[in-house]
Amino acid sequence: MDGTILSQRERRILAEIEAELRTDRRLDRALSSMRPRPVERLRGALRAAGRWPVAIAAVLVVLSASLALAAPRDHTPTALALFGAVWLVTLVVCGARLAARRADRRGDPL
């Protein structure tokens, strides 16, 4: 509230409202323990992945393709697990990039 000066009456009313809200223990407990829900955390992680440079997504695609070609010849669980992990990260990053791009075009927050 920079630049806005409350009158004496408005400050008194605001103080009364705040004092009344402080007496509500359930509300106080709920407000003091507010944490982002898992869905909000996932949305934040996808937003962050959507801001990664395109070069990282390109490197992940190339790495995923090379592991896809090498894994059948190698036949080891490690190679298959590595391919699966890189492939999953590649899908998430590319999907987040597409979603961020679409949101930017529409003017919506992701």
Image (cartoon, rainbow, N blue to C red):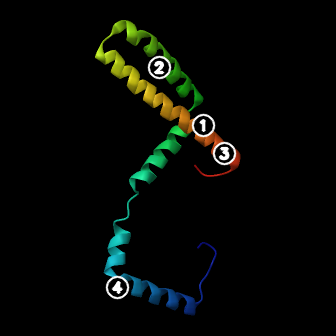
Residue occupied by mark 1: 98
Mark 4 or mark 1, earlier in chain: 4
Residue occupied by mark 4: 23
Residue at image location 29% in from the left, 17% down from the top: 77
**Callout 1 environment at 10 Å: few (<14), some (14 to 19), or many (20+)?**
few
Q: Amino acid at mark 3?
A: Asp
Residues at marks 3 and 2 touching, judged by CB atoms closer than 8 Å: no
Q: CA distance from mark 3 to mark 4?
A: 44 Å
The numbered disc on residue 64 is: 2
Residue extending farthest to the top is 73
**Callout 4 environment at 10 Å: few (<14), some (14 to 19), or many (20+)?**
few
Which of discs 3 and 4 lies nearer the camera? The answer is 3
Mark 3 or mark 4, earlier in chain: 4
The numbered disc on residue 40 is: none
The quadrant of the image that shows the N terminus is bottom right
Residue at image location 40% in from the left, 56% down from the top: 37
Q: CA distance from mark 3 to mark 2?
A: 27 Å
Q: Disc 1 on helix, strand or loop?
A: helix
Which of discs 2 and 4 lies nearer the camera? The answer is 2
Q: CA distance from mark 2 to mark 4?
A: 57 Å
- Between 28 and 65, which is closer to the camera in this rendering? 65
Residue occupied by mark 3: 104
Which of discs 4 and 1 lies nearer the camera? The answer is 1
Residue extending farthest to the left is 77
Q: Amino acid at mark 2?
A: Ser
Q: Disc 3 on helix, strand or loop?
A: helix
**Callout 2 environment at 10 Å: few (<14), some (14 to 19), or many (20+)?**
many
Mark 3 or mark 2, earlier in chain: 2
Q: Amino acid at mark 1?
A: Leu
Q: Would residue 52 be visible to someone looking at this image? A: no
Mark 2 or mark 1, earlier in chain: 2
